[in-house]
Amino acid sequence: MSVKVHFLLEDLLVEAPAGTSLQRIADAAGADITFGCRTGSCGTCRVRIAEGRSHCSDPGAEERDFLAGLDAPPDQRLACQVAIHGDVAIEYLGL
Ligand code: FES
């Protein structure tokens, strides 16, 4: 099964196999998301899941703690830490 990922800022729509990490999808698509550490500790890849939050993997404890430290609302995720299981729309925020 494939999923559709819409990168809103660039209006870029791409398809990828379900379960692919958002980092991999963004890299392959050339989406404008800055990845620093790629391990969930710098926050440069912060995005807002504008649509399809339920299609994202659940955040791990480290991602939850990091985003809580930024007072980020629940629709924000770290693109390097989330896998995509259904159609989503993504807005890049950065740190
Ligand atoms: S690239 Fe550093 S938190 Fe995602």
Image (cartoon, helix red, strand yellow):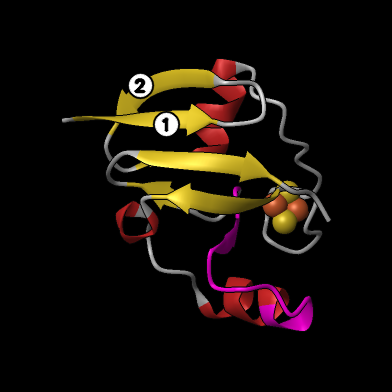
- Image quadrant where residue 9 sits: top right
Label drawn at residue 15:
2
Which structural element holds mark 2? strand
Left or right position of 70 against 26 = right
Figure check: 3 above or below 58: above
Q: Is residue 21 visible?
A: no
- The residue sitting at 54% across, 80% down in the picture is 61
- The residue sitting at 74% across, 48% down in the picture is 93
Q: Is residue 71 visible?
A: yes
Left or right position of 40 against 69 = left
Q: Nearer the viewer, residue 76 or 78?
A: 76
Return the disc, 2 or 1, that comes first in the chain's sequence: 1
Q: Amino acid at mark 1?
A: Val
Magenta span covers which residues? Answer: 68-79
- Residues at marks 2 and 1 touching, judged by CB atoms closer than 8 Å: yes
Q: Quick one: quadrant of the C terminus?
A: bottom right
Please tell me how crowded label 2 is: few (under 14), some (14-19), or many (20+) other residues with Cα within 10 Å.
few
Q: Amino acid at mark 2?
A: Glu
- The residue sitting at 31% across, 60% down in the picture is 54
Residue bearing the label numbered 1: 5
- Magenta span includes 82: no
Image spot of residue 11 (x, y percent):
57, 21
